Amino acid sequence: MGQSEVNFYQQQVVELLKQVIEPNLKKDIVSLGMVRNLRIVDDYVYLRLYIGSHQQQLKLEVESKLSSLSWCKKVYIQICTIPGVKITLGISSGKGGVGKSTTAVNIAAALSLQGAKVGLLDADVYGPNLPQMLGLGQADIEVIHTPTGDKFLPLEVQGIKLMSVGLMAEKNRPLAWRGPVLHKIITQFINDVEWGELDYLLIDLPPGTGDAQITIIQESPICGVILVTTPQQVAIADVRRNIYMFRQVGVPVLGIVENMSYLICGDCGSHTYIFGSGGGEQLATELQAPLLGQIPIDQRICSGGDTGNPIATSEQASPAGEVFRQIAIALHTTFSTIDQLNQL
């Protein structure tokens, strides 16, 4: 089979795969980045299908669509999923210091309060601070034996299952891991954690667009990302670089969270836009993705992160707590097949 023939057949396969629609996001599985490593060897089609635990029917749909190929003797589909996990979301930012990890913790807490089973994977290999934000000190990671091999057992804190690279490092020591070691650790954390049954697994990604971020995205069934930014134009410019990376691998941006949006006057309730305004709305318009929430500046957000009491839990009636609750509702609306949240 010549190269031109392979290219023609591959184009045929891709066009058929684009007819398979993921029911929640209502987009085809190719544009969602769920189909990867597509190869045609002789008269055989090989591909990887990255799905959640509740999306097994997509494999049957792919097989059905590709059965119309007269030249294809057999389709080999490798299912890539995290056992028991329905929805895997990335929480990302273009730069550090915009409150990405704080946002990840509070979204997880808000989802948990609404009755969802939530896990947090702290994959920020350069600044893994989710354990502290949930009030967890140094803790030993337990390894258990399962039919599919040894697995890490996540810690459970405040109703959230947590695994963090920070739990593997010595206190106050830098995580100075080079490429091959970093890649191995990341893939282990994606594939070798026994999460049990989860509605959502939130992955706190490292900021920026380096090797670690690309490895996590390519090795995990992330079905979309939430971008965290601040209002000023410098932060927006960094997020645009992030967007380019996600587009390269076909992972959709599900929404924007604008952090540090405004300061509320304690006396009159007026809003002061310390870092400017409009950045999140500008990004949302560019991406045609919803602006999920604008989080005000609130000292209780910071102190809650320092003491392990996320504001989404400790101050639910506060303006910031309400924003996180609305983000949880918006995610439920997007992924409306999750039965546990039907009563929102």
Image: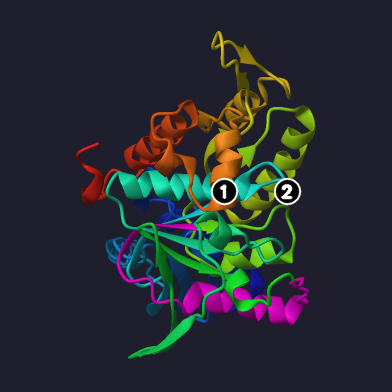
**Farthest residue, direction top:** 268
Q: Nearer the viewer, mark 1 or mark 2?
A: 1
Q: Residues within 10 Å of mark 2 (few under 14, many from 20)?
A: some
Q: Count the labels in the image.
A: 2
Q: Is residue 74 left or right of residue 103?
A: left
Q: Residue at x 32, y 71 (%)?
A: 196
Q: Secondary structure at mark 2?
A: loop
Q: Is residue 214 left or right of residue 141?
A: right
Q: Residue at x 33, y 41 (%)?
A: 332
In the image, what residue type sits under mark 2? Gly
Is-magenta flag for residue 327? Answer: no
Per the rendered image, the range of residues in magenta is: 173-202
Mark number, residue 305: 1
Residue 239 sits above or below residue 172 on the image: above
Question: Residue 254 location in percent, x, y?
Answer: 50, 41
The quadrant the C terminus occupies is top left
Q: Residue at x 74, y 36 (%)?
A: 235
In the image, what residue type sits under mark 1? Gly
The quadrant the N terminus occupies is bottom right
Question: Residue 132 location in percent, x, y?
Answer: 57, 59
Q: Secondary structure at mark 1?
A: helix
Nearer-N-terminus badge (1/2)? 2
Q: CA distance from mark 1 to mark 2?
A: 16 Å
Question: Residue 34 location in percent, x, y?
Answer: 47, 60
Is-magenta flag for residue 201? Answer: yes
The residue labelled by disc 2 is 96
